[in-house]
Amino acid sequence: MHRLNLTIDEALYEQARAVSFIEKKSISQMIRESLSEYIAKNTKTKQQADLILEAEDEKEILSILANEDFTSNEDFKNKFNL
């Protein structure tokens, strides 16, 4: 795991603290779950992020980011009945 520092306003912190108490979860756990859910909902961005993490070099990463017409492997297979 990695340590992460973030700044939130007082009202959001107090709400998170109250929910944390009610759900018997740490605020860190709630943030991890929220980030995972956010990433899962944004499938196109998640696929691009996965490609970036697998990229061999900076040039390949820039190419992935520049490609506005990103198509996932699954979409490509469906489109061409593969």
Image (cartoon, rainbow, N blue to C red):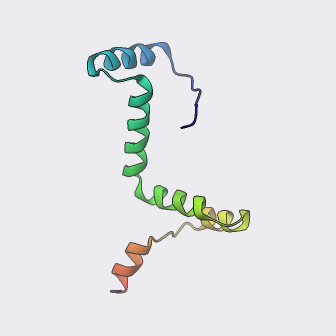
Q: Is residue 27 left or right of residue 19?
A: right
Please determine whether, in this image, residue 10 is positioned above or below residue 57. above
Residue projecting furthest to the left: 22
Q: Percent position (x, y) of residue 37?
A: 37, 43
Residue projecting furthest to the front: 1
Viewer-proximal residue among 63 and 73: 73
Q: Percent position (x, y) of residue 43?
A: 41, 57
How many numbered badges does the structure rendering display?
0
Please determine whether, in this image, residue 5 is positioned above or below residue 15. below
Q: Percent position (x, y) of residue 8?
A: 52, 21
Please determine whether, in this image, residue 61 is positioned above or below residue 39. below
Q: Quadrant of the N terminus?
A: top right
* Residue found at x 59% / y 58%: 53
Q: Percent position (x, y) of residue 17?
A: 38, 15
* Residue found at x 43% / y 74%: 73
Residue projecting furthest to the bottom: 81
Q: Quadrant of the C terminus?
A: bottom left
* Residue found at x 58% / y 31%: 3
* Residue found at x 54% / y 57%: 49
Please determine whether, in this image, residue 34 is positioned above or below residue 52. above
Occupied quadrant, residue 28: top left
